[in-house]
Amino acid sequence: MHGIIHPFSQALYEQDGKGNIRVSTDGKWGLFTLGGRHIEGEIRECDPQLCGWVGGPQVTNHRVPSAPTPSSPA
């Protein structure tokens, strides 16, 4: 999984593939909605803005060129 490490808590925020965010640190974890509401797990608090950012839509930037795919000519 790909995720983001929170700058203050150092917790790892990752998408779980089912529309939720998994937060883990020091061998503990918690599962949260995109809005930061606790679903399950030992960690009961999170940064709701980071949950929304990690779980939100992936938008491309027109200023950043996309990498060429192996089948397309360079």
Image (cartoon, helix red, strand yellow):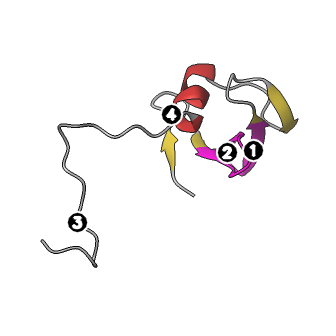
Three-letter amino acid code of the residue under disc 3: Pro
Percent coordinates x, y for residue 6 in the rendering: 50, 33
Decide if residue 66 is on the left or right side of residue 13: left
Percent coordinates x, y for residue 70 in the rendering: 27, 77
Three-letter amino acid code of the residue under disc 1: Trp
| Label 2 vs 3, first from the N-terminus | 2
In the rendered image, which residue does mark 3 sit on? 68
Q: Is residue 16 magenta?
A: yes
Q: Which residues are magenta?
A: 14-31
Q: CA distance from mark 1 to mark 3?
A: 37 Å
In the rendered image, which residue does mark 2 sit on? 24
For residue 48, above or below residue 17: above
Q: CA distance from mark 2 to mark 3?
A: 34 Å
Label 4: which secondary element: loop
Which residue is at a point 78% across and 35% down the rendered structure image?
43
Which residue is at a point 56% across and 21% down the rendered structure image?
49
Instruction: Find residue 10 and name its label.
Output: none
Percent coordinates x, y for residue 46 in the rendering: 67, 26
Label 2: which secondary element: strand
Decide if residue 72 is on the left or right side of residue 50: left
In the rendered image, which residue does mark 4 sit on? 6
Three-letter amino acid code of the residue under disc 4: His
Label 1: which secondary element: strand
In the rendered image, which residue does mark 1 sit on? 29
Spot the residue most to the front. 72
| Label 4 vs 3, first from the N-terminus | 4
Dominant SS in magenta: strand
Three-letter amino acid code of the residue under disc 2: Ser
Query: How crowded is the residue under tag 4: few (<14 C-alpha within 10 Å), some, or many (20+)?
Result: some
Task: Kindly indicate the quadrant of the structure image that contains residue 21.
Answer: top right
Asked whether the residues under the numbered discs 2 and 1 touch, taking CB atoms below 8 Å apart as contact, a structural biologist would say yes
Percent coordinates x, y for residue 17 in the rendering: 68, 52
